[in-house]
Image: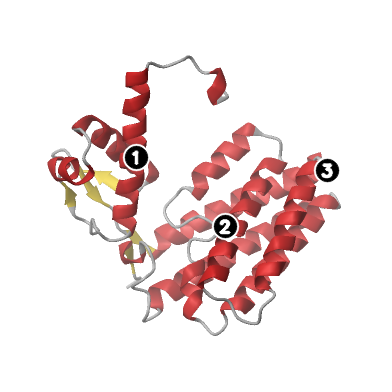
Amino acid sequence: MHPADEAPTSPLAEAGTSQAVKAQLRLREMVLAGELPGGARIAELTLVEKLGVSRTPIRAALMRLEQEGLLHRLPGGGYAVRTFSETDVADAIELRGTMEGLAARLAAERGVPAGLMAEAQACLDAIDTVLAPPTLDDEGFASYVKLNAEFHWLLSRMVGSDVIARELDRVKGLPFASPSAFVVVQTHSSQARDMLVVAQDQHRQSLDAIARREGARAEAIMREHSRITRRNLLAAVQAAQVHGLPGVQLIREAA
């Protein structure tokens, strides 16, 4: 159902929903920034004071972050910040690659409206412009992350299926599973731009396969595309300079 078609809500209900969303966004930032350490029990009253909202939106936000997988419910009540093994994160990335591969295959088999294809082409043209300089500064990386997210969003809409689009959005919402989750770690790598150029070539190849109605090829390319994120995961966990990477402290290095 489109949000505009939903039954009207009272101003009080809308205010409560807004407070819960604000609390959810702020709590997520706190978790990923390490303000709430992995394994730490979360005190509701402390959050009420810190965020300046009542306990009701705080509780709603905590429940939502549990659904996202960032928190887990404690046996005696309350929540704690989850930590993740490398396998957990790799599985989430693999799931995203599988889903995006499916989306690419179905888009190729069903055909994509010309307008949507044109949007995707324009997005990739913009990424080419970002990657044109021999090196990338912070602004270049930020632009790449934004455009990369846009391309992957457009891909999820090419299928013409609300079910697949919704599930892809859900998968990309898993901790560390988004297409650009580990791009920032490449900022300190001498091969940073080269890695993104490879990813961009895969973008181009997948869109070409979709346009040519080559479903199997489109699926294979997008599944391989997710392997770049897995490679970045290993770099993030193993590199010496990862302290600025949001959320990386929640990943437990393999024994």
Observer-nearest of 104 and 12: 12
Observer-nearest of 86 and 126: 126
Q: Left or right of 118: which side holds 26?
A: left
Q: Left or right of 132: which side holds 2?
A: left
**Residue 236 percent coordinates (x, y):** 42, 72
Residue identified by numbered label 3: 114
Residue 70 seen in this snapshot: no
Q: Earlier in the sequence, mark 2 or mark 3?
A: 3
Q: What's the coloring here? A: secondary structure
**Residue 224 percent coordinates (x, y):** 64, 63
Task: Quadrant for the N terminus, please.
Answer: top right
Q: Are marks 2 and 3 in contact (CB under 8 Å)?
A: no
Residue identified by numbered label 1: 22
Q: Left or right of 66: which side holds 159?
A: right
Q: Secondary structure at mark 1?
A: helix
Q: Left or right of 184: which side holds 33?
A: left
Observer-nearest of 114 and 223: 114
Residue identified by numbered label 2: 146
Q: Earlier in the sequence, mark 3 or mark 1?
A: 1
Q: Residue furthest bottom?
A: 190
Answer above or below: position of 29 versus 161.
Answer: below
Identified at 71% across, 40% down, the residue is: 159
